[in-house]
Every structure is written in C-alpha cells, then in structure tokens.
Image: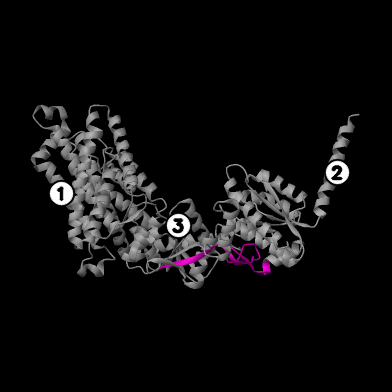
Amino acid sequence: MVSPAPRFLAAPRNVAQRNGLDSMDWEYTAELFLGGLTRGSIYALIALGYTMVYGIIELINFAHGEIYMIGAFTGLIVTGVLTMMGWNEVAILVIAATVAMIYSSCYGYTIEKIAYKPIRNAPRLSALISAIGMSLFLQNYVLLAQTSDFLPFPALIPEIGWWKPYSHIISSAEIVLIITTAVVMILLNFLIKFTRIGKAMRATSQDRKMAMLTGVDINGVISMTFIVGSATAALGGVLIASHIGQINFYIGFIAGIKAFVAAVLGGIGSVPGAVLGSLVLGWTESFFTGYVSSDYEDVFAFIFLVCILIFRPAGILGRSDTEKV
Amino acid sequence: MKRHPIAKWIAAAAAVCLVLTGTAMADTIKLGVAGPHSGDLASYGIPTVKAAELVVKDINAAGGVNGKMVELLVEDDVCKPEIATNTATKLVSQGVNVVLGHICSGATKAALGIYKSANIIVMSPSATNPALTQSGDYPNFYRTIASDDAQARLEVDFALDTLKVKKIAVLHDKGDYGKGLAEFAKKFLEADNRAELVLYEGITPGAVDYSAVVQKIKRSGAEAVIFGGYHPEASKLVTLMRKKKMDIYFISDDGVKDDTFIKVAGEYAEGVYATGPKDVANNPMTIKAVKEHKDAYGEDPGAFFENAYAAALALLNAIEQADSTDYDAIANALHNDLVDTPLGKIKFDERGDAIGVGFSVYQVQGGQYVEVK
C-alpha cells in the first residue's frame, strides 16, 4: 500500500516497451498474419452469401447469419448420428457438410418465398424489417427447439500426420478453412460469369423487369440465388463450428454482423470484394490486437471501416453504377 | 400556556427512556437483526431473520447463553442507507448487545458508524463490499461471506504460493464480472513483487477466434493466465492455447467452474484451475439447519441462510466464551475461538473476514472439477 501508484504506471509501460523492442519479430508478425487470414476466411465464408443475395435483389438478408447457425446445428446432429455409427472423420465431415448444405438451402428457399417474395415490390425498408423479423424468429426457434446452452462441436478436420510439427503455426483445420473459402469464391465467380444461370442472375440484377420481358424466369433465378447463398453459409457453418469447437443459437448473429461489415467494406454485391473485405477486416483486428490492444479491437475495426467508406463509399471493390454481381 | 404540551411530551419521552433502560437492565442478551424485511429486496433479508429465530430457539431451549435468554430485536432497513442509520439508532437505543446484519453493503456501511460509536459488534451474512473490512474504518465489523475480491485474492495467492509462477497475464471479457475480477487480480499482483504482470487485456466476448490474443500471451512469456469471465470464452482460449502448444497454467473463476466448460473444451480442459464457492451442502450442520427451516416454515431456506445461521452462532458463541457482552471480550473470542457452523469451523481474521469461508481452488482432472487441497 506504500507505493501503488508508481507500480501501476510501471507495469503497462514495461509491456509497451517490450512490444516496441520486438516489433521486428517476424515470426510474431507472421503468426498474426496467419491468425488474421483464418479470421478473415471465417468472415468471408459467411460474407459470400450476403453479398450474392444483395447483388441480385439488393436485399440485406439479415437471416443469413441464422442460416449459417442452422447449418452448424444440422452438421452437429448428423455428426452425432454418424459418430455413433462409427464412421471415419473425413466421411462424416463430407456427409455432414452435404446434409447441412441441402437442409439450409431448403431454409433459404422457404425464407425467400415466405418473407421476401410477397413484399418484393414494396419499399426496401419493408423487406429489411421482414429480414430482421426472420432472423429473430429463427434464433428463437433454434433456442426453443434445441437448447440455449453452448454445445461442443467435434473437430472433424483431422490433423494431418506429417503436418503435425507445424500445427501450432497453422493447423490443418485452418488450412482447410482458407482453401475452402478460396475455392468457394472461385466457383461462385465462375457460376456468375460463365454459366447460363449466372447470365440470368446478372440480367436480373441489372434490370429485373427487362430480364422478365426477355424470358428470364426471375423467380427461379432469385430462388437459385438464395439456395446457393444458403449452401455456402451452411458449409461455412460446419467448417467454422468444427474449427471453433462450440456452437449455440446466438453464433449466427455475431458472425453475421461481422460478415455483413466485411461485405460492405469489400463492396457489397461483389464476390471477390466480400473475400477481400473479410480478409482486410480479419487482418485489421488481428494486427491491432497483436500490436496495440484487444480492448478496442472492434472500435478500431469500425473506425477503419468508416475511413474506407469515406474515401470509397461503395467499398474497396464496389462500383456504384455498374453491374452488382 | 404554550409550553405546557411540550413539557408533557418531554415528560412522556423521559418515561419511555426509563422504560427502555429498564428493559435493557433485564437479564437477557439482545441480538439485533437488521436488513430488508419489506420491499423489493426483502427476499435477501428474511432468510437471515429466520436463521436467527432458529438459532435463538435452539439456544434458549438448551438453557440460553450462560443462563441468559436471548432476545431478538428485528428491524427493517429496506436496504436503503438513509433508513439503515435510523434502524441502527433504534437498535442502539433499545440496548442491543450485538447485531446480525445488515444485508446490503451500502446500508451496512451507513449503519456501521452508529454501531461503532456505541461500541457494538456487527456481523453481516451478506455484505460483500471489500472496503467494509479492508479499509480499517470499522473494527466492529465482521462477516461470514467472502468479499467481492476474494476470488481474485485466491487466484493470485494460488499462482504465487502454490504454482510459484513469475510472469502472469491477466485477461478478462470486458464484462462487469470478469473485468471487476481482473482488476482486483491486477491490483494484488502489482502490490506483490514476487511476480510480474506481463499482460493485461480485455477480449471481445463471442468473437470467432482469439488467435491474436493467444499469440500475444505467448510472446509476453507468461507462465500463467488469470482469466476473469465465463466459460464460452475460456474454452475457446484454452483450446487455442493448447493447440498452439502452449502448456502454461490457466486459472479462472466460478464463471468457468461449470460443467459446460469441460464438455465444450473436452480434453483441452484437463489441468485448468478455477475457483468456486466451497461446497457446504454436505456439512451435517447445514443439513440440520435446512431441515429445521423446513420443519418450522415448510419451505427451503432463501439467500444467505447458511451465512446468517453461521453468523448468529458465531456471535452468540463469542458472548458465551467471553461470558460478558463487553466489546473487547466478544471481539477477542471472535478472533480466537473456532465455532462449528454450517460453513465449517470458522473464526475471524484481524480485519473481520471469516477465515475458511468462501472459495476454494478446483482443477479439472479426468473430466471433472476436483478440489485442490
């Protein structure tokens, strides 16, 4: 009790000094970079669906985070059943992810038909409120039908034997996450740019009425967009839950908000933009935590978002007046 | 003409005083019970009244304290500091010997000064504000509940005395509970030069991944992490630390001493330390007290019942040991005589906190929390 004040000042300064001294520590920087990459890939897997739906019908689908959460829950249930039957990890992962994607796609399709299609021509705000309502409904539905507790999610992505010595730098689960994000991004880009349905999507996005007049089945196109978006969310749900190791009914909300921010940062409506925005957000958070403090991690991330939006109001890769797919 | 009614009042007051002093002279021991007995916080105060009633009934049935019957003086303070001063004044004027109460920290603090100037010992079953005992302002105050900083104290002592670590990182989840605890831990570490506080940070609850924070802990060279918060974040942190091959101690609080933590973190939970309330449910005294309560009132006891039961026993035992209601004699007995209560055998340290009451350290061993002796 004699000199608490000097000690109080001394301790944080020591930490700051050490940080300054070791700032050329490349290993630490590399680890923060990889941490940010993983975090960014997690955001990106969710952001892709957000951005796609927005690109086609200019609707911020707030229920997207809940689709991700439902995907994770479906994956957990399938995993539980298959583990009891004694299947091996990789087979369980593939089947759980497939089932989760199909099941969540059904949810995505149904949500669109119930909550968005009837008010497609109403003011934009109505659809937004409908989306928020759907999001709350799904959260509470899972809360009541499942549980409010945190549930353990088994690690489905096995540690590859020869990679084990390096797994403390980046684990195989993280590698799988990063690769999956890249593959999903490339496939979505391909789907939109080079396929027939992709052409129809772009047409719907540009001018819904005109596309309809030239024979595009816009209802089918919009349904397809929701199906694809929900499937990516569910895939993300299973992989991310398996990486984090726990789920509850609320994970979709928090992850969804961050993914939405990332999509806006990258330029909402742009598929590569969503991934770029997510990575930028992930790195920002990771480096800020690593070199400054995690106390203000979110504050800093959002200040950064505001700064980027001041200089590029449509986001990093967004173009405000051209096609948004 | 005008003075006449006032004089009448003065005479009446004098008469009342005489009557009061008269009762105080009678050969009983007056145990005051103060706390909220009405209003929205009544549920915190009423179990203490019932505990006192049960203890007094038992003691009087067995012949009283050294032959003197114990009399209860129950006063309501509604948990409000401004009313608590009146409650205290009233109890003092009724010639109370010792007081069981008050319940809320704010009300207790307000009342303590009045008891102090009247040389009356007060024992609270529930006021957890650390300053009540630690400030040294109230030598007449005792309590049978651990103070708010007891968990942080225990965590820091455990890290320094048992684990003997030199570098400690303190993390919290930015919440009232977690951050409050972490701030106490930080204060204790800084006041002790056996270990260095190498990192003090808040993490964002619910974030998808904490790898940056974990890397930061690794770089700080910490040998132990003290985490203030709840199990969802703790399990993510521990899992990530173990995956990153960091084999350092992880010490947390009763927000983590939860079976969900073990379920979620699985094999990674092994070896994690967490402080949690001492389990008193199997103490024969507790079982007896709870049964008495059920027999007398037909329901399970409420909040702080065991603490109040223990406090009533401790106070009356001290008077019996001291064989007087003299302040110094009672204080001496409280500090030196072990008394058997539902909280175990207790006595009080020099500040007035009950020794051996409150929290113990648990460790995850084989998939469950085991008390560390």
Q: Nearer the viewer, residue A18 or B12?
A: B12
Separation of disc 3 and disc 1 at Cα?
A: 43 Å
Label 3: element kind: loop
- 1 vs 2, front mark: 2
Q: Position of residue B206 (x, y in %)?
A: 36, 51
- The answer to whether the residues at label 1 and label 2 have Cβ atoms under 8 Å apart is no
- 3 vs 1, front mark: 3
Horizontally, residue A113 falls left or right of residue B186, namely left
Graded by Cα atoms within 10 Å as few (under 14), some (14 to 19) or many (20 or more), the crowding at tag 3 reads some
Q: What subunit carries mark 3?
A: B
* Residue type (three-letter) at the residue carrying disc 2: Ala
Identify the disc placed on residue B15: 2
Q: Position of residue B88 (x, y in %)?
A: 71, 49
Q: Nearer the viewer, residue B294 or A150?
A: B294
Horizontally, residue B79 falls left or right of residue A171, namely right
- Do dots 1 and 2 share one subunit? no
Question: Any magenta on residue B351?
Answer: yes
Identify the disc placed on residue A186: 1
Marks 2 and 3, the one that precedes in the sequence = 2
Graded by Cα atoms within 10 Å as few (under 14), some (14 to 19) or many (20 or more), the crowding at tag 2 reads few
Report the residue marked by disc 3.
B255
* Residue type (three-letter) at the residue carrying disc 3: Gly
Residue in view at x 76 percent, y 66 percent: B323
* Residue type (three-letter) at the residue carrying disc 1: Ile
Identify the disc placed on residue A103: none
Note whether residue B185 is visible: yes
Separation of disc 1 and disc 2 at Cα?
A: 96 Å
